[in-house]
Amino acid sequence: MGKLLMLMLEGTFTSLRIFFLTLLFALPLGLLVAKGRMSRHRIISSLVNGYIMIMRGTPLILQLIFVYFAPYYIFGSSADRFTAVIIAYVINYAAYFAEIYRGGIQSIPQGQLEASSVLGFSKVHTFSHIVMPQVVKRIMPAMGNEVITLVKDTALAQTIGVAELFRVAQNAAAREFSTMPIFIAGVFYFVMNAIVSKSFDRIERKLDYYR
Amino acid sequence: MAVITVEQVKKSFSTLEVLKDISFSLEKGEVLSIIGPSGSGKSTLLRCITNLETVDSGTITIGGDTLVTTTDQGNAVYADKHTISRIRLRVGLVFQNFNLFPHFSVIRNLTEAQIHVLKTPKDEARQVANELLVKMGLADKATAYPYQLSGGQQQRVSIARALALKPQVLCFDEPTSALDPELTGEILAVIKELASEHMTMMVVTHEMAFARDISNRVIFMDDGLIVEQGSPEDVFAKTQNERTKRFLNRFGS
């Protein structure tokens, strides 16, 4: 039992690495994608829109397989499994984050931009100090949803053979002819998401100082 | 000396001609009211002067520098970015809906542009802000957030925010239209006080009595044109213009 828990903690560590690395890259990339989607240049906005449609319109598991195997057929070699997982997750989640950002940015009243312009703020200052702080507050609930989904999506990494928490649990279940490890994994996921959801609650409360 | 001159300004939104041929000037220390029915182009005119909208043709100069001029071919040519950002700060704008920054405290609403645009040192910016808040009767609200204030208080903050940049001209775009009559009085009193200090102002308003009482000059606009301009007495009491009469009759003034 102790050994099983050790293995599962190791798997959890891998899951968490996927989780944090995905957030680290997908959160900023999503902002860039949102900017592209809202671009006034038709070519840029439709290209980015096409990318978002593919990312949201096909299963993540398929994208994962594509990212891992496509380079093999084209270049004769693949990235290592873990890198492929991170790339696939980042480009998938950036698309979802982008749409959340876009909704938030477009919900900021035009008057905020006009006031910024009359006061002489640069575009960069307006975006970083006037628009984004208000966007962050508005998108927190939607972001919470997405991040919770990401915790559970890390389980898909096993498709290309990365030994994250769920794969470890399944292996143990097969070895011991028991479903118990799977249920324990369930508890692990639940605890991780409880932490995520508490953290979001806390951030939302912190941002509650204004309306 | 004219602080703002506007010559033959035209502006259309696709096929709708909003400003047909507007010329006027605003002298230093003058209070100019612009009245007229909704859709007559008053607000658009103000937005062209504050560079929130671009004109199709015509000339606008602010404090002696050209914001936009027109070539012989009739194309509007704007000054370069650097010049625009320099001269646009000479004109402050107070909005109908205040447009305060909700995530900033009152004091930060007043200091942000001083610090980041004028590069005023923080202490000095805070001092300017506090003096303005005292003047607006809001000394105790420095650390409050906009949502905690009444509409009238919010509008006073937004006037202070505009004044903090020490503009040569302060423009008001229907500053009381979002307020109830009691709060309206509050704002009009502030504008009156500024007028007594010889602040140069341009006020787009539906408050006829107010326009009559505080303005040095009144412009009546209709359908994208200046129908009539003159002293408040000329426009309100002695007008011979049928269109002006019809408009004023509806206000019973």
Image: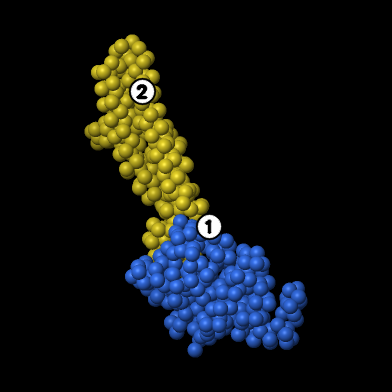
Chain colours: A yellow, B blue
Q: How many marks?
A: 2
Q: Residue tagged by mark 2? A: A185
Residue under the point 49% across and 63% down: B141
- Among all residues in the image, which is located at the extreme front? B140
- Among all residues in the image, which is located at the extreme top? A177
**Dot 2 lies on which element?**
helix
Residue under the point 39% across and 57% down: A128
Which image quarter holds the C terminus of chain B? bottom right
Task: State how far apart marks 1 and 2 are (Cα).
Answer: 47 Å
**Dot 1 lies on which element?**
helix
Residue under the point 53% across and 57% down: B148
Disc 2 marks a residue whose amino acid type is Ala
Residue B117 showing in the rendered view: no
Residue A182 showing in the rendered view: yes
Residue B133: x and y in percent read: 48, 69
Residues beneath discs 1 and 2 located on the same chain: no
**Could you tell me which chain the residue with mark 1 belongs to?**
B
Residue B118: x and y in percent read: 37, 72
Q: Residue tagged by mark 1? A: B148
